Image: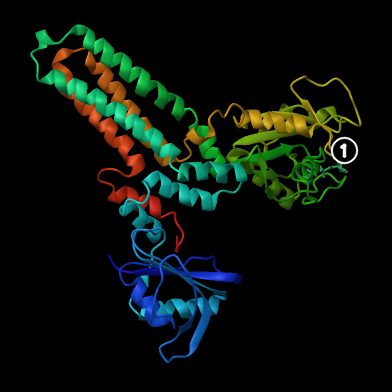
Amino acid sequence: MSTIAAIATPAGRGGVGIVRISGEAAASIAKKLSDQKILSPRHVQLCHWYDADHSLIDSGVMLYFQMPHSYTGEDVIELQAHGSPVLLRALLQRVFDLGASPAEPGAFTRRAVENGKMDLSQAEAVIACIDASTLRAAKLAQRHLHGEFGAKVQSLMHDLTGAVAHVEACLDFPEEEIPALLFDQIHADVSEQLVKPIRAWLATASLGERLFDGVTVAIVGAPNVGKSSLLNALSGRDRAIVSDIPGTTRDVLEIDFEVDGIPVRLVDTAGMRSSDDVIEQEGIRRAEVAADDADIVLFVADASRPETWQVEYYADDAVNRHEEHHIDIKLMNKTDLAQDDYPEIYLPLSAKHGIGLDALMERLAELLGTVDAGEESLLVTRSRHRESLQLALQHIEQGLGLLGSEEKFDLVALEWRRGWTSLGEILGIGDIEFILDRVFSEFCVGK
Ligand SMILES: Nc1nc2c(ncn2[C@@H]2O[C@H](COP(=O)(O)OP(=O)(O)OP(=O)(O)O)[C@@H](O)[C@H]2O)c(=O)[nH]1
Ligand SMILES: [Mg+2]
């Protein structure tokens, strides 16, 4: 494999910038580049790095990780230079001139997988760690990185191998010699050790994926009910313009916050009503789209104006298809002004005085399924893993269905082998070139 190099720190200025080199030529490139002619593995070496004309590019710290004790499993050099984009580019160019080639996104981690340093699910945890936007998600990714997730897949694969072995052993015997009870036992074992846990595991996927992908929550309702006030109150920032003039918000406004560690994009929209104003009409149209696209829709009404309570209030309006929207939570705002009887379905709120926000957060958490997360380390967090688990389950269940009929042992074994392959794909076992391409396309350069 060629020797690769890239800047591992993010683009832009910073205190320190790192150039990473991995491969056979890494050490010799480092020696040619610097005034340090003896590399000492796992030691911090202060050095100067020079250009071809012997002019100084930068000075800093060099680290040498000798194979196989490195991230990639190859010889790795890290040059910790000043975080100047121009100097880092010059340093990297010099490394290229000395024989390294540019690293593709994720190339270092891909080599780590190919050299057996980590399995594919751990490599995905690396990107998940980097991409996580809440601490809960980042901590979960850390646990996957340390192999708890992979270990569970391996134990399923182990149990499935056992089941295949049992079935295949039966193939070698004439039917009449196989005790009928044996099949009941295999059936029970596979149901208990594989079907049940995989089903339970798959049930965690919606929360797991949400922790990383996040959800969108749209706030809709009539003008002047306090939608923008709610956005400000929830985010704790004075972000949206609030006024007593109906039709204040005309555009769609988004802010990011979190509910129980789930990243939430909160979307404020224009109040819905019929309007002759073309700009307001466009705002209302965008509000419709935002509500359509949202995972969760909050409907806000004004306690002091009963005409804003009914979602049907909008129904006769040509521009408004509000009734068609799926509304998840109905909120009665301005309960500080009026306590009139309103339908029980509404959660009471006063966005202006911060009342009712905790109950709203609780309801949101409930809807997002964050409660009862159970064993966090075992959450399925990636669609790729979910798809492989679903496929594995399908094959295992198909095999189970065939188990009753004795002529079909070979088909049972075949289905279960397919199931095994699907599980293996999660860890990157088997013919995985296309899976590697899919996984590593999501990485950044230098990782
Ligand atoms: N008394 C009281 N007034 C509130 C409350 N929430 C909002 N208001 C007031 O209601 C008015 C409208 O609030 P906004 O947040 O701008 O309402 P909106 O729904 O975003 O209005 P549009 O953008 O026009 O659709 C402002 O004067 C707010 O101060 C509340 O809980 N109690
Ligand atoms: Mg508004």
Q: Please tell me whether residue 105 is drawn above or below residue 36 in the rendered image.
A: above
Q: Residues within 10 Å of mark 1 (few under 14, many from 20)?
A: few
Asked whether residue 243 appears in the rendered view, the answer is yes
Q: Nearer the viewer, residue 26 or 128?
A: 26
Q: Please tell me whether residue 29 is drawn above or below residue 77 in the rendered image.
A: below
The residue sitting at 55% across, 75% down in the picture is 85
Relative to 118, is 62 on the left or the right? right
Q: Nearer the viewer, residue 158 or 388?
A: 158
Q: Quadrant of ligand 1?
A: top right
Q: Can you tell which quarter of the image residue 231 is in?
A: top right
Percent coordinates x, y for residue 317 in the rendering: 70, 35
The residue sitting at 36% across, 77% down in the picture is 29
Relative to 2, is 370 on the left or the right? right
Q: Please tell me whether residue 3 is drawn above or below residue 342 in the rendered image.
A: below
Q: Please tell me whether residue 336 is drawn above or below residue 61 in the rendered image.
A: above
Which of the image's four quarters has the N terminus? Answer: bottom left
Q: Type of residue at label 1?
A: His
Percent coordinates x, y for residue 211 in the rendering: 56, 40
Question: In this figure, which residue is indicated by the disc labeled 1?
Answer: 353
Q: Answer yes or no: disc 1 within 8 Å of ligand 1.
A: yes
